[in-house]
């Protein structure tokens, strides 16, 4: 626990003494102080009575420091880099160097951002994701990108949610993902669009089971490389009051993927992802929030490569299944539900807490039934990094079945 506490302190101090920190691989909302000139839009909420970690540190080291009432995001792009240290079950300790460009394309557009983060972990994993959300004038179009390169040693545990943790099989592979989507405003908060997605794995190696048997991975079809290349159809509804930390509103995204041999895939196959979220204040009129999340990832037809099957914590933001290591469960169908209650601990909003409960169920091979629901649950602490954007540092401890447990650190709410 002392090592974990030291990591958290380093993360906070590194972020605020460099004056910039951004949500890595997540909501792409900046949480830093910006120049007052060239201001396009100011926060509409008076934050004078609220505090974040920037206020706390400045009050310690700056004489007669007075907290700013609000942050601003200017027309001029903001370019920042920050070192950080984190921890997760899948990486153990990790060091990252992250850079961001944040801007508005026009005075009336939402915040656009490009985020890149290069990381190296205790498990000798190298990660380089580039995630982008670009809004055009009047928010008529939004372009969403998720591109990444991984050198990734990681274990797999077989297919279905009845798989046994003792059946762990070590793997190593390289991953290249290219995913770009363009959506057009239709009406209200509704957008429609299309995109292209490439998932390529190569240098795939694995360790055979100690008992000499055939693993689920070998039975499914072990290959030294795999490619999934296809087009997507996308729909989006987003009425949340804050994308990084919603207190009310609704979010729904539907993504249909069609992977074809004609585009370079190993097989023809189709899948769909349905991501739905809803937020309520509880009690009504308070700052406390109860949030609900449904994430369903289904193979509709065909046979995907093993590493492209739905799996724990392989959603876009790698946040499903707190309580379990990434890739703990895998299968042709994934149903996922989660609820989280978020509450203030200090009146100034600096410290908050959460309790969460989730459940996930997977089928094994295509056409088989869903297996047991595997629960995850636990408490968490929230430390306010920016009072204007409501961005928190999340420190959660999750529990699951078969003795699974671990610490999860995130910037920005999990969902």
Image (tube, helix red, strand yellow):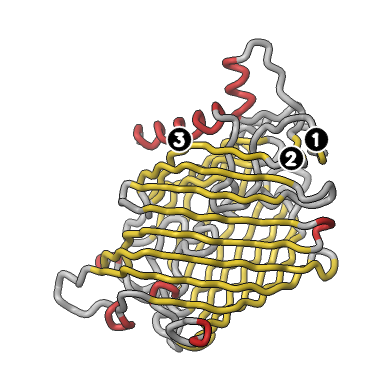
* Residue 117 vs residue 76, the one in the foreground: 76
**How far apart are the alpha carbons under marks 2 and 1?**
7 Å
x%, y% of residue 36?
A: 77, 29
Choose the circle earlier in sequence order: 2 or 1.
1
Rendered position, 126 above or below 214:
above
Name the image quarter holding the C terminus: bottom right
- Residue positioned 47% across, 42% down in the render: 97
For mark 3, give the secondary structure. Answer: helix
Q: Which residue is mark 3?
A: 8
Between label 2 and label 3, give the one nearer the viewer.
2
Q: Is residue 405 visible?
A: no
> Within 10 angstroms of label 1, few (less than 14), some, or many (20 or more) residues?
few
> Within 10 angstroms of label 3, few (less than 14), some, or many (20 or more) residues?
some
Q: Is residue 62 visible?
A: yes
Q: Please report contact status of discs 2 and 3: CB closer than 8 Å, yes or no.
A: no
**How far apart are the alpha carbons under marks 3 and 1?**
34 Å
- Residue positioned 70% across, 33% down in the render: 34
* Residue 142 vs residue 284, the one in the foreground: 142
**How far apart are the alpha carbons under marks 2 and 3?**
32 Å
Q: Please report contact status of discs 2 and 1: CB closer than 8 Å, yes or no.
A: yes
For the image, the number of numbered tags is: 3
Name the image quarter holding the N terminus: top left
x%, y% of residue 393?
A: 55, 40
Choose the circle earlier in sequence order: 2 or 3.
3
Between label 3 and label 1, give the one nearer the viewer.
1
| Residue 325 disc label | none
Q: Which residue is mark 2?
A: 76
For mark 1, give the secondary structure. Answer: loop
* Residue 250 vs residue 402, the one in the foreground: 250
x%, y% of residue 347?
A: 68, 31
Q: Which residue is mark 1?
A: 38
């Amino acid at each position: 626990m002392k090592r974990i506490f030291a990591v958290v302190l380093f993360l906070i101090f590194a972020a605020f003494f460099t004056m910039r920190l951004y949500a890595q691989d997540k909501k792409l909302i900046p949480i830093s102080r910006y120049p007052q000139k060239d201001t396009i839009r100011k926060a509409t909420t008076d934050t004078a009575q609220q505090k974040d970690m920037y206020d706390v540190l400045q009050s310690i080291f700056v004489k007669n420091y007075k907290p700013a009432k609000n942050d601003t995001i200017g027309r001029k792009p903001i370019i920042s880099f920050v070192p950080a240290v984190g921890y997760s079950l899948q990486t153990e300790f990790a060091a990252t160097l992250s850079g961001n460009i944040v801007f508005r394309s026009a005075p009336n557009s939402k915040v656009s951002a490009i985020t890149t983060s290069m990381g190296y972990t205790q498990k000798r994993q190298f990660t380089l994701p580039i995630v982008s959300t670009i809004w055009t004038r009047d928010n008529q179009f939004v372009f969403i990108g998720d591109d990444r390169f991984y050198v990734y040693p990681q274990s797999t545990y077989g297919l279905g949610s009845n798989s046994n943790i003792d059946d762990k099989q070590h793997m190593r592979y390289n991953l290249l993902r290219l995913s770009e989507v363009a959506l057009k405003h239709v009406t209200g908060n509704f957008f429609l669009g299309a995109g292209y997605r490439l998932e390529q794995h190569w240098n795939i190696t694995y360790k055979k089971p100690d008992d000499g048997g055939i693993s689920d991975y070998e039975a499914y079809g072990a290959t030294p490389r795999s490619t999934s290349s296809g087009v997507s159809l996308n729909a989006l509804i987003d009425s949340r009051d804050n994308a990084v930390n919603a207190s009310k509103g609704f979010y729904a995204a539907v993504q249909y993927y069609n992977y074809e041999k004609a585009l370079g895939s190993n097989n023809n196959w189709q899948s769909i992802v349905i991501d739905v979220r809803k937020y309520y204040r509880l009690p009504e009129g308070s700052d406390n929030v109860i949030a609900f999340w449904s994430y369903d990832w289904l193979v509709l037809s065909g046979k995907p490569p093993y590493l492209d099957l739905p799996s724990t914590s392989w959603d876009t933001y790698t946040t499903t299944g707190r309580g379990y290591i990434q890739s703990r469960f895998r299968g042709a169908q994934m149903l996922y539900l989660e609820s989280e209650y978020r509450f203030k601990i200090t009146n100034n909003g600096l410290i908050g807490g959460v309790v969460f409960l989730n459940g996930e169920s997977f089928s094994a091979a295509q056409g088989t039934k869903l297996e047991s629901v595997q629960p995850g649950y636990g408490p968490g602490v929230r430390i306010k990094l920016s009072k204007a954007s409501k961005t928190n540092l999340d420190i959660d401890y999750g529990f699951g079945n078969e003795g699974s447990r671990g610490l999860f650190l995130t910037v920005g709410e999990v969902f």
